[in-house]
Amino acid sequence: MTTEAKFDYVIVGGGSAGATLAARLSEDSTIKVCLLEAGGGGNHLLIRAPAGVVGMLPGYGKISNWCYQTVPQPGLNGRRGYQPRGKALGGSSAINAMLYVRGHRDDYDEWANLGCDGWSWEDCLPYFRRAENNERGADGFHGADGPLQVSDQKSPRPITRAFVEAAKQLQHRETEDFNTGDNEGVGLYQVTQFHDRAKNGERCSAAAAYLFPVMAGRSNLTIVTGAHATRILFDGKRATGIEYRTGKTTSRVAATKEVILSGGTFNSPQLLQLSGVGRAADIQRHGIKMVHELPGVGQNLQDHLDFILAYKTRDTDNFGIGAAGTGRLLKSIMQWRRDGTGMIATPFAEGAGFLKTDPSLSRPDIQLHFVISIVDDHARKLHMGYGFSCHVCALRPHSRGEVFLESADPMAAPGIDPRFLSDPRDLDTTIKGAKMTRAILEAPAMATYRHKELFGTTGNMADAEWEKHIRARADTIYHPVGTCKMGTDDMAVVDPQLKVHGIEGLRVVDASVMPTLIGGNTNAPTIMIAERAADMIRGTAHSALAAQ
C-alpha cells in the first residue's frame, strides 16, 4: 500500500458533479483538493466529436463506458436493461447527447415541499445561471460567463424542422427556450457544445468546461485517473479518507475536512454499502462490517423508461448505413474539423417535445427526443439504410427501484433494479405518450420523409397491443437518480446541505441526491447541484475558519 497523502477535500468521481465541484473548490488556492476518477482522461476524439457517441454508447469495447446491466425486469418481459454510464473525466456528460435541459420549475418546488429547504426553483436558478455560458447571452434565466458552454445546434437537419412542424400541425406550441421553468412545447434542444472559435462544435463535457482549462495551472488540485475507490475510511463515525486501487496498487488518501462522493446514482450508494453504511440486511450478508445503519442507501431509484418509434426513410441527409450517406459523412468530418458544423456536430436527438397527455395537468408528463437515425436497442441492433426515430418517456415515474451489492468485491458492478413498470400508472402514461408521438410522426409535415414504419405499430392499435410493444422494447433513456436522496425523513440519506445523516465529514454530491426525478434530462441539474454544493461547502469552511 502506498503512503497516504493528505488533502482538505477528497472527491470520488470526476463526472458532471465531481468535475464541477473539484474546479470550484480549488479556486481557493489555500484549499487542497484531490479528485479520484476510475475512468480515463476524457479528452479523446470520440468524446470531443459529438457524433462519436455512436462509438461509445452501444458499449462495443466499453470505450469510456461502464456498460452496466439491470437485473431481469418482470415489467419488461424478464429482459435485462442496459445502463451505459460514462467512464472518464466528465462522466456521462462525455458520452451523452449533450442536451441542456433543466426540467420544470415545479420539479424543484416539489423538492422544497418535501423538506429540502433551499432547493426551490428560485433557489436553484442562480446556480444554473452561474454554470452557464449561453450562446444567446445573459438574461433573467441564462448566464453568459460560466464554464459550461451552451449552444444552439450547429446544423440541425431539415427532417428535424419537419418534426417540429408536424407537432405544430397537431396544435402543439413551438418553444424557443425549454429552460425558463415552463418547458411545454416542441422545438430544438440547446446543447452543451463549444461555440467559441477555438473549439467550435466540440462537445463541452463537464470536464471540458470545468477541469481542462484549469487543471494544469492549479498546484492545489490533484487528479488521479484510473483510481477505483474501494471503501471510505472512518474514524468511528467520521469519514477520514478513501482507499482506492490503480491497477494492482492499493493506495489511501486522507481528507482533513470532508470526503465527497460524486460517483453517481449507481456508484455512490455502492461505495457507501461497501464501506458499511446502509441497510444492515444489504451489507452484513456480504461479510462487511457495519459502520452506520442508514436504510435509505440504494433505495428510491427512479429512471425514465423510454419507448422508441422508428421509420425507414429514403432521405439520406441523416445518419444511416448506405453508400450515399457514407460519402456525405466523410465530407462532414472534414467540415466539422474545419469549422465545427455539419453532421458530426449533431447531438442526434435534435428535436424536443415536452407534452401533456391530459390538458388539465399542471406540467408536461412526457418528453420526446426526435433522433436523425434509427435507434434500436441503444443502437446495438443496426439496420441497413436510413431512418428516423422518436423516443417518448413518462417524466415522473411512480415505480421505485434499488441499487444493491452483488458481492463484497469493490471492482464488481453494482446490482441495479429499477423495477420498471412496477407501478401501472407508468404504463398508462407511456401508452398515451406513444399514441401522441405516433400521431406527430404521421402528420402531413412528415409525409416526405416517411417510407416504412419499422416495428409494426399502427394508428388503431388497442392499449393491450401498445403494452406488448412497450414491454418488449422499452428501456432506460439514461436518467437514474434518487439512491442517496436528500431530505429529513427516515429514508433520506443526506440532509439539505448534502451531508450524510449520522456521519461526520461525508457528503454526497451527484444525481443520487435528487429526492424525485426532474421532468427532463439530468446533466444540467447535476451540474447545478454541484455548483450549489460548492457554495455550501465553502460557506461551512469559512464559518469554521471565522470561529477559530
Image (cartoon, rainbow, N blue to C red):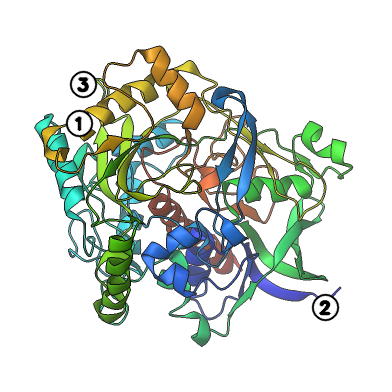
Instruction: Indicate the secondary structure of the residue bearing disc 1.
Output: loop
Nearest to N terminus: mark 1 or mark 3: 3
| Residue 352 in which image quadrant | top left
Tell me whether the residue at label 2 lies in contact with that at label 3, contact meaning CB atoms closer than 8 angstroms. no
Q: Residue at x 52, y 41 (%)?
A: 481
Point out which mark residue 3 bears: 2
The three-letter amino acid code for the residue at tag 1 is Glu
Q: Reading the chain from its start, which is encountered first: label 2 or label 3?
A: 2
Of badges 1 and 2, the one in the foreground is 1
Q: Is residue 80 left or right of residue 119?
A: right
Characterize the local packing of mark 1: few (<14), some (14-19) or many (20 or more) Cα atoms within 10 angstroms: some
Viewer-side residue, 43 vs 332 = 332
Badge 3 element: loop
Q: Does any portion of residue 544 appear in the rendered image?
A: yes
Left or right, residue 310 beside residue 76: left
Q: Quadrant of the C terminus?
A: bottom right
- The residue identified by callout 1 is 442
Q: Earlier in the sequence, mark 1 or mark 2?
A: 2
Marks 2 and 3 sit apart, C-alpha to C-alpha, by 62 Å
For residue 273, which quarter of the picture?
top right
Please give the residue where the numbered disc 3 appears in the rendered image.
359
Residue 530's spot in the image, x, y percent? 47, 57
Q: Is residue 49 above or below residue 125?
A: below
- Percent of width and height locating residue 476: 49, 39
Of 356 and 58, nearer the camera is: 58
Please, is residue 363 above or below residue 323 in the view?
above
Give coordinates of residue 452: x percent, y percent: 28, 36
Instruction: Name the residue located 26 percent from the left edge and 51 percent from the top edge.
Output: 189
